[in-house]
Image (spheres, rainbow, N blue to C red):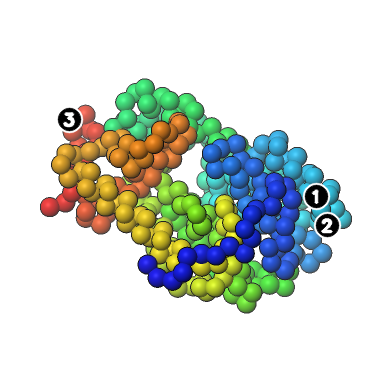
Amino acid sequence: MSGAPPTFPAAEPPPFGTPREVAPGVLWLRLPLPFKRDHVNVYLLQDGDGWAVVDTGIGDARTQEIWEAVLSGPLRGSSLTRLFVTHSHPDHAGLAGWLTRRHALTLWMPRAEYLFSLALQYAPSELGAESWRAFYRRHGFDALAVGKVLGRGYRYLHHTTGVPGTYRRLRHGETIVIGGREFRVLTGGGHGLEQAMLYCAQDGLFLASDQILAGMFAGITVTALEPEANALGAYLRSLALLRREIAADALVLSGHGLPFVGLHPRIDAVIAHHAERCATIIEACRDVPRTAADLLAVVFPHPLDEQQTGFAFGEIVAHINHLVAEGDLLAEPDEDGCLRYVPAP
């Protein structure tokens, strides 16, 4: 690990619903979430006479009320010009439908993230039914545990107002001008399918969404939709790209936590965290073959509620799939088709 730890230009966040200028022409708006991670950061970029919005907050009445208060209070007299949504998770995309309809905005979004949002909007039952049940059972959950996680753990997916029927695609490598600033679009996998980030090299501004956070780790998960995905591998490749492409002294504006400076050492710390987690999993499988469900208590020894269990399980599978892809773990199916893992010889 190299370099000093991240520093924080703002020691404390603004109150919910109170925009704060975090750089010239950039407002930081913190919105509440009804989860253990209790907030999400959205940003407004000066765009001519109005403001371009980056992410929306979750799709619930409380967040709508905060947006109404902001637009009738601190931003009164200003218009919203367009909406950039970095990825499909409801805390970032939840009010996309509502905001685009209410303010006649064009939605800008990466293609994979937009299409997944459409899938959640029009076919939610297909995303949670038997494919998920089989996925959990294959990795060692019993029927009772599966029922609890599926019954309560994915309610957050319904905190959304949908997305409009048309959008403007955000493409990796393209340059977008917002209020006279040139932002380069970067996309990366792991946390999302094709999460978008915006980088203004001239002003040293990096809107990172959830790809890199200070003081917490982005969730890297595998789901029943693509059960053999190497999400962790995609994420580590994305971090390597960010280390090459983004200046070490850029101001990082993330989707959660505080804005910070010190991107490169933070990337190093995140990579070390995942390497340590992989080592823990290999060691736990050394004496006895283990399922992903067995490994939950090893990697997450503290109590988890149903939603946390769902996320934690997806993280375990992400690390297992990466270790299998790297040749460090082998899968041994038992007579019921349940997968148990052992270190490669």
Residue depicted at 62% across the width and 58% down the height: 11
**Residue sticking out furthest to the front:** 11
Which quadrant holds residue 24? bottom right
Q: Nearer the viewer, mark 2 or mark 3?
A: 2
Q: Secondary structure at mark 3?
A: loop
Q: In 3D space, how far apart are the residues under numbered discs 2 and 1 (Cα atoms)? A: 8 Å
Q: Earlier in the sequence, mark 3 or mark 1?
A: 1
Pointer 2 local density, CA inside 10 Å: few below 14, some 14–19, many at least 20: few
Residue depicted at 43% across the width and 54% down the height: 190
Q: Amino acid at mark 2?
A: Ser
Task: Decide if residue 83 is in sight here.
Answer: no
Residue contact at pointers 2 and 1, CB within 8 angstroms = yes
Q: Secondary structure at mark 2?
A: loop
Q: Amino acid at mark 1?
A: Leu
Q: Is residue 172 left or right of residue 77?
A: left
Q: In 3D space, how far apart are the residues under numbered discs 3 and 1 (Cα atoms)? A: 60 Å
Task: Decide if residue 9 is in sight here.
Answer: yes
Q: Residue 327: x, y in percent?
A: 21, 55
Q: Earlier in the sequence, mark 2 or mark 3?
A: 2
Residue 78: mark in rendering: 2
Residue 335: mark in rendering: 3
Q: Amino acid at mark 3?
A: Glu
Task: Look at the image and tell me in which quarter the N terminus lies.
Answer: bottom left
Q: Residue 41: x, y in percent?
A: 62, 52
Give the residue pinned by disc 1. 71
- Does residue 32 lie above or below 78 as drawn? above
